[in-house]
Image (cartoon, grey):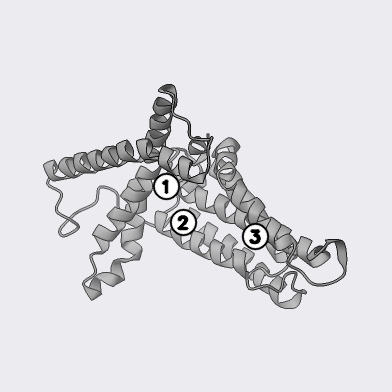
Amino acid sequence: MVMKDITLGQYLPGKSILHKMDPRMKIILLTFFIVFIFVARNFIALAIMAAAVMAVLFISGIPPRMYFKSLKAIIFIVLITAGLNLFYGTGDALWQWKFLKITQAGINTAVFIAVRIIALVLISSVLTYTTSPTDLTDGIERLLKPLSKLHIQVHEIAMMMTIALRFIPTLLEETDKIMSAQKARGADFESGNFISRIKALIPILVPLFVSAFRRAFELAMAMESRCYHGGDGRTRMKVLKYSKYDFAALAVSAAVFTGVIVCSIYLPTTIRTGM
């Protein structure tokens, strides 16, 4: 089922270089990777980013099947997006039926957009695969610390973001269990019209919401029993420090980003859409 293919929020322990990196550096580099995937305006620049993403996946030490699972969850979106862009292009038609036509520009755009989406999903998966929820919370909090000068509750915001990310796989697993139980009782979620399918989801949504509220209450009780009162006066068992791995990753990433900028400026643009 699709539920089992969604891997967002999962952490896989390991001893790779990425596991040893500071979470702040991983968050910063991820942000720049996402930005420069969109900065790439031709296939050469995009190929550089794609090669960098593949290198990161290899270095992470995460089994390839985990990345394939993350792609299976968005393959429908990739196909729809690429299919729409396939018919959006100027030039001589390679194939035409009434108002629909496929041009070389449309093919280039479809391939370009598909590679972009796949690269975004893969590089985003690396962060959660190689960073524990605790480290992710600390990294987000330290990066957002300047906002505390504006009396913004940075620690609470980071905690909420991490808890939400952490419970995504838990809720998906719970949904899968509920759907399996309902199917065992004769429920049908696939036949009928759109309205019937929506109504069939009610036996899933009700117990799912009950389970989510129960888990939230249990988590709140566990935090209160451990005297959790927010970020004021809290100390950390693990102090974040940048290491040689972080500076090496920063240097390599800077070289990659420089290559993307040069190729995007001096080489012809592949796509001319706003996407």
Confirm or deny contact between disc 1 and disc 3 (CB under 8 A): no
Q: Where is residue 214, by image quadrant?
A: top left
Residue 120: tell me if it is visible. Answer: yes
Label located before the other in sequence (2 or 3)? 2
Q: Is residue 9 left or right of residue 105?
A: left
Q: Secondary structure at mark 1?
A: loop
State the residue lying farthest toward the bottom: 265
| Circle 1 crowding by C-alpha within 10 Å: few under 14, some 14–19, many from 20 | many
Q: In the rendered structure, which amino acid carries the disc numbered 3? A: Met
Q: Secondary structure at mark 3?
A: helix
Q: CA distance from mark 1 to mark 3?
A: 22 Å
At 47% from the left and 39% from the top, the residue drawn is 15
Q: Nearer the viewer, residue 206 or 80?
A: 206
User: Residue 150, position in %: x, y?
Assistant: 24, 75
| Residue matched to label 1 | 131
Q: Quadrant of the C terminus?
A: bottom right
| Foreground tag (2 vs 3) | 3
Label located before the other in sequence (2 or 1)? 2
At 61% from the left and 47% from the top, the residue drawn is 75
Q: In the rendered structure, which amino acid carries the disc numbered 2? A: Lys
Confirm or deny contact between disc 2 and disc 1 (CB under 8 A): yes
Q: Where is residue 100, by image quadrant?
A: bottom right
Confirm or deny contact between disc 2 and disc 3 (CB under 8 A): no
| Residue matched to label 2 | 26
At 32% from the left and 62% from the top, the residue drawn is 142
At 76% from the left and 74% from the top, the residue drawn is 267
User: Residue 189, position in %: x, y?
Assistant: 48, 35
| Residue matched to label 3 | 49
Residue 60: which disc? none
